[in-house]
Image (spheres, grey):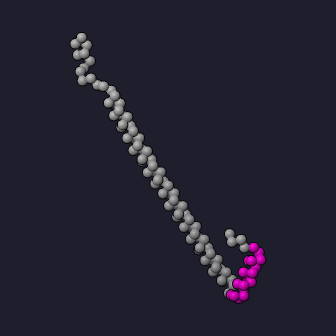
């Protein structure tokens, strides 16, 4: 992650030993470990929340698109049915009276 090698880690350990002393170094390392663990859990939780929100937004957009497709299909079907009704010429006179008048 930070690309720290062996010599860099050794230098950090020596400086920490000189700053905290041999008595306080284990408790300082434990405290630092706890804080790092909390920070990692916080970052992990935030990533999960963001991923969940993005997924929810994608689902909402998909539902909205599906609704638009359904409405478009209904409009197209209604238009087609209306066009079919217009193209069919229904004669108001019954078929029996047509044959009788001849």
Left-right relation of 77 to 45: left
Q: Position of residue 75 (x, y in %)?
A: 37, 41
Left-right relation of 4 to 36: right
Q: Residue at x 24, y 24 (%)?
A: 92
The residue most toward the right is 7
Specify the quadrant of the image occupied by residue 20.
bottom right
* Quarter of the image that includes the C terminus: top left
Left-right relation of 28 to 75: right
**Stretch of the chain drawn in magenta:** 5-23
Position of residue 31 relative to residue 50, above or below, is: below
Specify the quadrant of the image occupied by residue 16.
bottom right
Position of residue 26 relative to residue 68, above or below, is: below
Asked if the stretch drawn in magenta spans residue 22, the answer is yes
Asked if the stretch drawn in magenta spans residue 28, the answer is no
Position of residue 98 relative to residue 58, above or below, is: above
Position of residue 68 relative to residue 31, above or below, is: above
Q: How many marks?
A: 0
Q: Position of residue 12 (x, y in %)?
A: 72, 81
Q: Residue at x 64, y 79 (%)?
A: 32
* Quarter of the image that includes the N terminus: bottom right
Q: Position of residue 46 (x, y in %)?
A: 54, 67
Q: Residue at x 69, y 72 (%)?
A: 2
Specify the quadrant of the image occupied by residue 83.
top left
From the viewer's side, name the closer residue of 11 and 88: 88
Magenta stretch, main secondary structure, is: helix
């Amino acid at each position: 992650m930070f690309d720290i090698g062996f010599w860099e880690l050794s230098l950090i350990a020596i400086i920490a030993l000189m700053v905290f002393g041999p008595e306080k170094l284990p408790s300082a390392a434990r405290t630092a470990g706890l804080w790092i663990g909390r920070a990692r859990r916080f970052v992990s939780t935030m990533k999960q929340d963001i991923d969940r929100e993005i997924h929810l937004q994608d689902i909402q957009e998909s539902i909205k698109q599906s609704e638009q497709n359904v409405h478009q299909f209904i409009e197209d079907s209604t238009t087609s049915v209306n066009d079919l009704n217009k193209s069919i010429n229904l004669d108001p006179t019954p078929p029996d009276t047509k044959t009788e008048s001849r």
